[in-house]
Image (spheres, grey):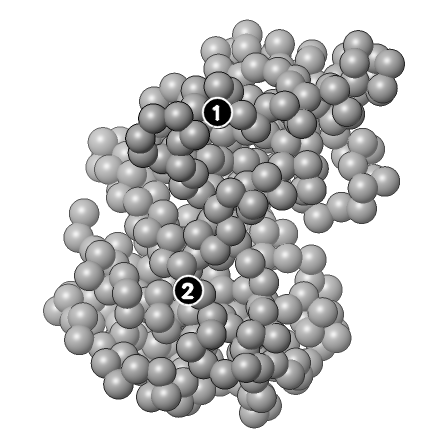
Amino acid sequence: MSKPVIAITTGEPAGIGPEISLRGAHCCRDIVFPVLIGDYAWLKQLAGKMDSGIKLQKLDSARLHEAIEKKETASIGVIDSPLQAPVIAGQLDPRNGQSVLAFMDIAIAGAMNRQFDAVVTAPVQKSTLNDAGIAFTGHTEYFAEKTETKRVVMMLAGSVRKLAGDGHVMLRVALATTHLPLKNVHKAISIDCLLETVSIINRDLKNRFGIVSPRILVTGLNPHAGENGYLGDEEIRIITPAIRQMQETGIRVSGPFPADTLFQPRYLEHADCVLAMYHDQGLPVLKYATFGHGVNITLGLPLIRTSVDHGTALDIASRGLGMANHGSMVEAIHIAAEMAAVSSQNRRQNGK
């Protein structure tokens, strides 16, 4: 395919999102056609202070189509979605909450009508959106709601150096549950939940990552995977029966494994994804190994969405430009482009 068109929502304007979006788009413009979604005046002001080589152009729908057709790369396109209040770096303002939400809405609509091949999101501040009167749990949940997707799966991925031999392996960790209090996790795990979750992981690893026969490892919920029921019986009642049902359908899934010993090269180098039962069971390991270069990916959506592996970093933003690391944004754009290429190839093969 030609360069994929990647929409990049610039996130919380008082955080590092606008800066890393500008730097990431500028770095990746040789492999993608980046389109920033945010306040054009604010982004132009930042770009002027950051790097005179970063050129921006304001786009509407007609101008975007024309720029794509001409393969313009001298400047980065921006779909202008104005903020409601002036920005002070590091200081949140609920008046801009609705504008931040509008960035996402524009990206989702554009991806659904295939104007964009993928969406990459910079971090938002959940508290600011809620302070603005918007019930907001997170990007993952919001994209699911707006696309009317019944179940989505959060997966983080990053390249990890092999402990033995040369090169790197891609570590992928998906979650059976996402932003839940720990006391509620066991209530949210059921056989049906796990069947749907693994089905989504298996399908998207095939259709968007090009992995022909994915290998998925599943953790237990309890310490030592329940230790035969001594430390909890969810593995016996729920997780093991679900795994057996999935194996009967031909999915290459195994477990449950104790989470404290699963994250070792002898397991991970022969797996395409680990499914952890809850947020802080799997993600600390991945973030320790990949932080600053990891990518958050939402599986199960009718569009491609990736994101950085960190938050708004208001403290870094308050110290001025040039302090933020845009490595995760670059990786998110790269993975979005790779997923878009695989998806495009699949559509061509299926005649769609």
Residue at 77 percent across and 24 percent down: it is: 223
Dot 1: few (<14), some (14–19), or many (≥20) neighbours within 10 Å?
A: few
Tell me where residue 241 appears, x and y as whole percent.
69, 12
Residue 300: x %, y % from top left: 51, 39
User: What SS does tag 2 mark?
Assistant: loop
Residue in the image at 71% along x and 77% along y = 132
Amino acid type assigned to the residue bearing label 1 in the image: Pro
The residue type indicated by label 2 comes to His
Q: Give me the C-alpha separation between circle 2 and circle 1.
A: 28 Å
Per the rendering, the mark at residue 326 is 2
Label 1, secondary structure: give it. helix
- From this viewpoint, is residue 287 visible? yes
Q: Give the residue displayed 31% in from the left and 30% down from the top.
A: 166
Position of residue 45 measured from the top left corner of the image (x, y, whole percent)? 39, 89
- Side (left or right) of 245 relative to 47: right
Residue placed furthest toward the left: 70
State left or right for residue 348 relative to residue 112.
left
Residue 262, relative to residue 176: is it above or below? above
Badge nearest the viewer, 2 or 1: 1
Tell me the quarter of the picture where residue 46 sits: bottom left
Residue 265, label in figure = 1
Q: Is residue 289 above or below residue 163?
A: below
